[in-house]
Amino acid sequence: MTLPYELGEMKSENGEVLRYEIEVTASDLAIQLSTIIREYPIYKEILEKTRSPKTDLYFQTAIKEEIYAVIRDLCVLRWYRRNNVPVPDGEEVVSAPPTGICLLLDQIWPDKDIPIRFAEMSLKDRLNLRYRSLRSFARRSVDQGSAFYCRWKYKGFPENRPEGKGSIAVQYVDGVDFQRRSDLVWYPGSGIDPARVLMYFAWPDHHPVNAKVIQSIEEIGINYVSLNIHSAECSNVPVWYPSFNGGKKTIVLRLRPGNRVEKWIYNMGRKLINEINYWSEFYKTFNIRLHVIIGGRDLKYIAQGIAFDLMVAKNGLIAGKERSELQWPPVAILGWYPVDVFFTWAPRAAHYLRPNVNRVIASVAAGYPNDVVFDHKVIDAKKLKDVLRSRGVDFTISLFDNAHGPDIAHSTANMERFYLAFLDWLLEDPTVGILIKSKKPSVLQRLPRVLPVLTQAEATGRCVRLGDEFGRLPVDASLASDISVGIGISTAIIEAAIAGCRGIHCDLTHFRSHEFYQWGYERLIFDDLDRLMVSVKGCKSGNSVYAELGDWSPFLDRLDPFRDGRAGERMGVYLRWCLEGFDEGLNRNEIIRRANEKYHNRWGEDKAVIL
């Protein structure tokens, strides 16, 4: 199907953008399909060999990825019919590839008056698939060949680990700068011996680390290792590769596929088992008991959890933290947070983790993880605000954008409207200032209508784009502003509110089922840009009608009940309790239960819950 679509412009029957409907539908169908394949002998063998409830989650997540494009086309075609939009000849059906799990879709197809057609792959598509397979094989061969060289060159790995005691593995993604988003935000104040912490680099999770990053890690005193030769620019970073079994027991599948569906199950099972074997050896090599990950939408994270499940007495756990406001319908986040312990900003986050589609064991409310930097940021923000005042600004707005495009909840057209409304106001009013903290440079680069107006605005000296966007905290802008505005249900606005700033959501996705609409419609959240602009301009004029615009003070305890600069410390202490539990020989469930009890005694019973 080639029907044109803009998911951020198309609305479901409940008035919300179509993207939400697609996510929920794809998750529901993926769960149904995972139930069907349970009857296949080859899947039963995979379940028997992996012995983990997370295996179902792995396949559910993989199924969703496989069928997502087909479900999107279904929902788009259904939207056309629902809104009586003419459909060209030949576009009345949804095409699906006649491979893998898609072949089972017609058994659970939710809308029988929209037929599904299985189209054979073209020669070009088959060649492209073959090319990608060969390229992947070539990359693995290069890596494996490099492995022997690296093990010869770097004979020693971290030697300062306490003998016999488990370690914490930390995935490097955000970096180690504590003034920005940091992968080690939990470490200061944790009381954990740095010799028991191993940070690993695994490109393409991040850009190759440079000498400055390595120096910062060495100053902290923790160990580090690269998992491939592409992950670090420095030649002296040790590289680890698995020993290619080396006589150790690994999981293998005995059954072979007999049809296309079984072939897909078999291939996904092989992929899962390869990941399990890899991470099992990693955990054994470095004696890992805790694995702190960035989490989110990657099958390897689920495989990491299964690798721990296969260890004796489930002798390890995965921990992750909330990086953004949990806002999606619960079932839509299938496979997004596949951790055992999930550190959230507030107890209300547990609502979005139920039903427990991610197999999370405990939700632990610790507060906004970067709150320790707020006091320092206030000083820098005052300097920035003084600069704008010197240029005639008496009212400053911070703007926070998001990714946009046809497949995203935020359309490019809406993002352009958002920016142009504020930039045009700045050009009209010489007392208005704007600070822009973009999600990443490509967001603005892909807004051709905005760029020339932005250039004019920047030329006034009253519009400032904050650079080095990745990992930069929103408070760099919001603390220097009179009010902040974010597109959609904006995580940046929640961070601004926790820091004590005023902020409003410009929700052009019309996600009216979100609780913020009950908290303060057209005070904290708007679904109409024109009405939002009227309110912000009224706020600037000092009109008392808008005195409470963007004021989150009645709800701050529900966003972050602590707000004391100690969120990272709470996370770290909880992790230390878990590490101590492993030292004592307890199993994972006993460790989490005991850590929760300690957390209850210190911070309250509602702050750590079993899901």
Image (spheres, rainbow, N blue to C red):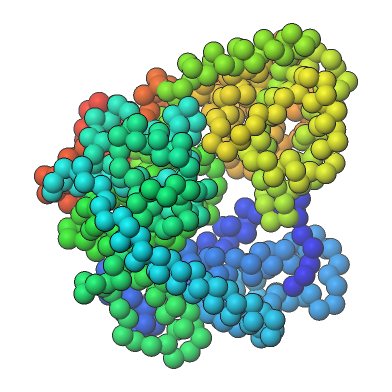
Residue 508, located in which quarter of the rendered image?
A: top right
Identify the residue at image location x=49%, y=17%: 376
Q: Is residue 351 above or below residue 454?
A: below
- Marks counted in the figure total 0
> Is residue 51 or residue 465 the one in the foreground?
465
The furthest residue to the bottom: 258
Q: Looking at the picture, how far across and down is residue 559, in whole percent?
A: 48, 29
State the residue in front, 188 or 243: 243
Image spot of residue 283 (x, y percent): 26, 56
Quarter of the image where one finds residue 194: top left
- Residue nearest the observer in this picture, 38 or 592: 592
- Camera sees residue 120: yes
Residue at the (54%, 65%) spot, across then down: 65
- Please tell me whether residue 51 is drawn above or below residue 174 in the rendered image: below
Residue at figure coordinates x 40%, y 69% from the top left? 145
**Residue under the point 77% across and 19% down:** 462
* Residue lying at the far right of the rendered structure: 428
On the image, the x and y values in percent for residue 546 come to: 71, 16
On screen, residue 78 versus residue 308, left or right, reads right
Q: Looking at the picture, how far across and down is residue 257, in whole percent?
A: 42, 87
Outermost residue toward the front in this view: 153
Determine if residue 354 is in view. no
Taking the image as shown, residue 52 lies to the left or right of residue 580, namely: right
Q: Quadrant of the N terminus?
A: bottom right
- Left or right: residue 278 versus residue 396 is left
Answer above or below: position of 446 versus 522.
Answer: below
